[in-house]
Amino acid sequence: MTQDEFDEKYPLILGWIQNTLTEHAATARPIASLGFKRLPFYFHPDILTGAKVVYLPKVPTPPLNAIGLSQFADFEKLNADGITYLDTFFARNEMRDNEALHFHELVHIIQWQLLGPKLFVAAYADGLERIRYRASPLETMAYMLESVFRNSHAPFAVATIVREQIHALYS
Ligand SMILES: [Zn+2]
């Protein structure tokens, strides 16, 4: 995608995100209210109260094909367990008790905060376009940290590590 093409499509993507969040605002729940036991050892309370989740049968993805970005058709059809937009993530209903999935999406919320919406969308799209979903840099970071969370019970400061990695990747 060229810079001009991105600048043309970005407002459409952001508009879709804002509409989608508004549409589901009434059912969005703060992560701090869910009763997960481990998350408070990894994330600052401000993140856990500010971040929200909406559970649905299927997570919503932007209509990328419809706005002329057919190269992302695979991503649109992915049927992911979760997907994060700004301060909110959507998760499939079956993921309600999956603390690691919540951990993973919280990593994306920190990435959104650090990069800001325009850079996050640009970096995510660039990763998808050039490297594919699972190996794109923002996903690699989230899956790597999620794997540490799953395999060890020693807490660590997630935001600090994400900040260092974002800095190394994008500055
Ligand atoms: Zn992810």
Image: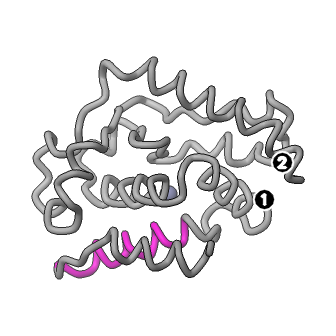
Mark yes or no: residue 91 visible. Answer: no
Determine the CA span between mark 1 and mark 2: 7 Å
Residue at numbered disc 2: 71
Q: Position of 108 compared to 137: left or right?
A: left
The label on residue 97 is: none
Confirm if mark 1 falls within 8 A of ligand 1: no
Q: Is residue 98 magenta?
A: no
Q: Amino acid at mark 2?
A: Gln
Helix, strand or loop at mark 2 = helix
Which image quadrant for residue 27? top left
Q: Amino acid at mark 1?
A: Glu
Mark yes or no: residue 112 visible. Answer: yes
Quadrant into which the C terminus falls: bottom right
Q: Is residue 141 magenta?
A: yes
Helix, strand or loop at mark 1 = helix
Which image quadrant for residue 42? bottom left
**Magenta region's main secondary structure?**
helix
Q: Position of 26 compared to 63: left or right?
A: left
Q: Residue at x 56, y 81 (%)?
A: 168
Instruction: Assess disc 2: are there few (<14), some (14-19) or many (≥20) residues with their C-alpha within 10 Å of its C-alpha.
Output: few
Image coords of residue 46 (percent x, y): 21, 51
Residue at numbered disc 1: 129
Region in magenta: 139-153
Q: Along the polypeptide, which appears first: circle 1 or circle 2?
A: 2
Image coords of residue 72 (percent x, y): 76, 47
Instruction: Assess disc 1: are there few (<14), some (14-19) or many (≥20) residues with their C-alpha within 10 Å of its C-alpha.
Output: some
Image coords of residue 76 (percent x, y): 68, 40
Confirm if mark 2 falls within 8 A of ligand 1: no
Q: Marks 2 and 1: in contact by CB < 8 Å?
A: yes
